[in-house]
Amino acid sequence: MNRILLSAGGIRSAGTRTGWQGNMRRWSNNTGRWSNSMDQQSNNMGQRGYSTGQKVGVLMMNMGGPRTQDDVGPFLRGIFADRDILKLPLQDILGKFIAWRRVDQIKQQYAQIGGGSPIERWTRAQGDGMVKLLDRASPATAPHRYYVGFRYTEPSIRQAVENMLNDGIDHVIAFTQYQQYSGSTTGSNLNELWRVQHQLDPDARLRWSFIDRWGTHPELIGAFADRAEAQVRLLPDHVRHTAPILFSAHSLPLNVVDRGDPYVAEVGGTVAYVVNELRRRGVTNPYRLTWQSAVGPQRWLGPQTEAAIKSYGTRGFTALVAVPIAFTSDHIETLYELDIEYGEVAAEAGITHYMRAEALNDYPPFIAALASIVHEHITDGFPASTQLLLPDPGPESPQTALTRQWIAAQAALNKSSA
């Protein structure tokens, strides 16, 4: 693949090295121009089968989060009703019961982080920055528009598709904001997208392509390494090189893992690349991958982040750095679970220097990474991921099979047009 990496030139955390920048063609904040090689790549797009009159929209898909306290109940009911996440006996009944049991507790947690989730605000900030860079990088498909489509809250995937149809979009890039693929996250979003587009667009006015995973993209790795390194550098000298780094990711039910879901391997891949970059920068701290946010009666993937923090505290560690490696935006799992809940756990365990790496949010190198990923997708002819077209070895729902067939058909149309 002819990769063009768009980096926000020179913007890094204080005390960090330039990392990936030496190999990047980048946007210059000083000159306001793309590099000559980027301009040449954009000028050559017509040779790769693109229509310069095509209106391209980018659908930024995620789980979403409640805007207000009143949205917490419907948000939880949506999650526990989704069989792509949890398969429960009598799901319509038991799922609602679990949501009802948890709603007051979750409302209290959201109250401690401002009353609602900031994920929509961060997603819009990311989208705004991304399309500004894309318009310069890919003028043949500009102006680009992004649309936010959440699985369980507003703005919904349905609302996003309605808006794209009303705006006369021709080609939609469905861009998951889960950088590591799981059938319970990206897969659930794609299944909902299949249902919505079949209802709203029966004549198939919209052409689709998919960015389904990007957990080892160099610019993403560089941004994660920046955030982790910045916290390590803040530690006192006597613990700076020995404090464990816990890369914390959202856990999965073990029955999802057992069917061959690739999430665990892909999160591990992200961690390996980030650690390699940290080692290159001279950060040699030991590390572990841990899992958080297990709920419900099923067995979940471990070790749990909370248990790991307690364990290291009892073993005499007084410093620890937590890095949210499967989240790119702040929300309840970072602001409440990692910061407040696990911060208290760490203090009780005797860890006096508990650090949490900042989420990527609107960090300029991360915004540039999003633009790079979409730009590469456009210039490479809207390719389909072979991983996305491969079913898990274990049982597959009829809906997931239908969604994969639709994705394969869209991929064939895009390939024939290239």
Image (tube, grey):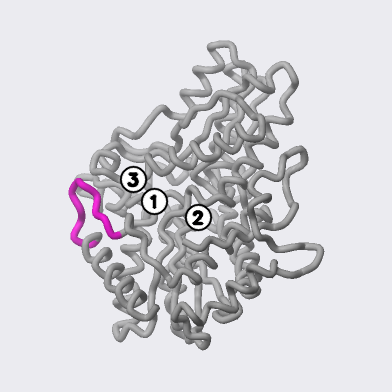
The residue wearing badge 2 is 65
Mark nearer the viewer, 2 or 3: 3
Residue 93: percent from left, percent from top? 25, 50
**Are the residues at dot 3 and dot 1 in contact (C-beta closer than 8 Å)?**
yes
Q: Residue at x 47, y 79 (%)?
A: 164
Which segment did they paint magenta? 389-399
Residue 9 sits above or below residue 238 on the image: below
Residue 243: percent from left, percent from top? 62, 22
Q: What kind of element bears circle 1?
A: loop
The residue wearing badge 1 is 181
Amino acid type shown at disc 1:
Tyr
Mark nearer the viewer, 1 or 2: 1
Q: Earlier in the sequence, mark 2 or mark 3?
A: 2
Can residue 96 be seen?
A: no
Indicate which disc residue 2 carries: none
Q: Would you say 134 lies left or right of 214 here?
A: right
Pick the quarter of the image with the C terminus.
bottom left
The residue wearing badge 3 is 262
